[in-house]
Amino acid sequence: MQLNVSDIILHLVNIVVLYLLLRLLIYKPVRKFMDNRAARVQAQMDEATRINEEAHQKQVEYEQRLAAMEEEASNKMQEANRAASEAAAAITAQAQEEAKTILEQAQTEADQQRETIQRQVRPQIVDISVDIAEKLLGREVSREDNRALIDSFFQSQEKVG
């Protein structure tokens, strides 16, 4: 087998033409396809990263909102408890004041009734005392003497009671 220069040149030209055809028909479209695919993958990765970051930001925002709402709810509960305690204290104080007023009125009424009864019963007691004294002594005691004795008794009782 002889190597002929023209065969070598022809083979070299065929190789160069084949290389150029393969490069033009296969390499460039495949390279373009691969670049497009890499760009799509990168775009999808960027989009996924962006969505992940947005989700993380929203999660942080929602957690902050939730914490703020929980704090607000806690504050409202404390305010409601404080208001209820104040209302209960006010109602208790008012009830105690009303009870005190009722007791004072009852005491005043009882004192007035006792005095009224004593005024109404005093003449009857005097008459009964005179009758008893007359029967015991066997003589008549003047009503004035007996009245003076009973009045002094009642006055001493009023000082004691």
Image (cartoon, grey):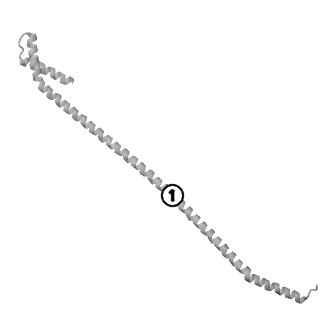
Q: Residues within 10 Å of mark 1 (few under 14, many from 20)?
A: few
Q: Secondary structure at mark 1?
A: helix
Residue 39, how many percent across, how many down?
65, 74
The residue where tag 1 is placed is 64
Looking at the figure, which quarter contains the C terminus? Answer: top left
**Looking at the image, residue 89 lies above or below residue 5:** above
Q: Quadrant of residue 122?
A: top left
Amino acid under label 1?
A: Gln
Q: Is residue 20 left or right of residue 104?
A: right
Would you place residue 14 above or below residue 71 in this image?
Answer: below
Residue at (80, 85) in percent of width and height: 16
Residue at the image point whose x is 62% and y is 70% from the top: 44
Q: Is residue 53 rendered to the left or right of residue 82?
A: right
Q: Quadrant of the N terminus?
A: bottom right
Left or right, residue 17 beside residue 33: right
Which x, y percent locates residue 61?
A: 52, 60
- Residue visible at 76% across and 84% down in the picture: 21
Q: How many marks?
A: 1
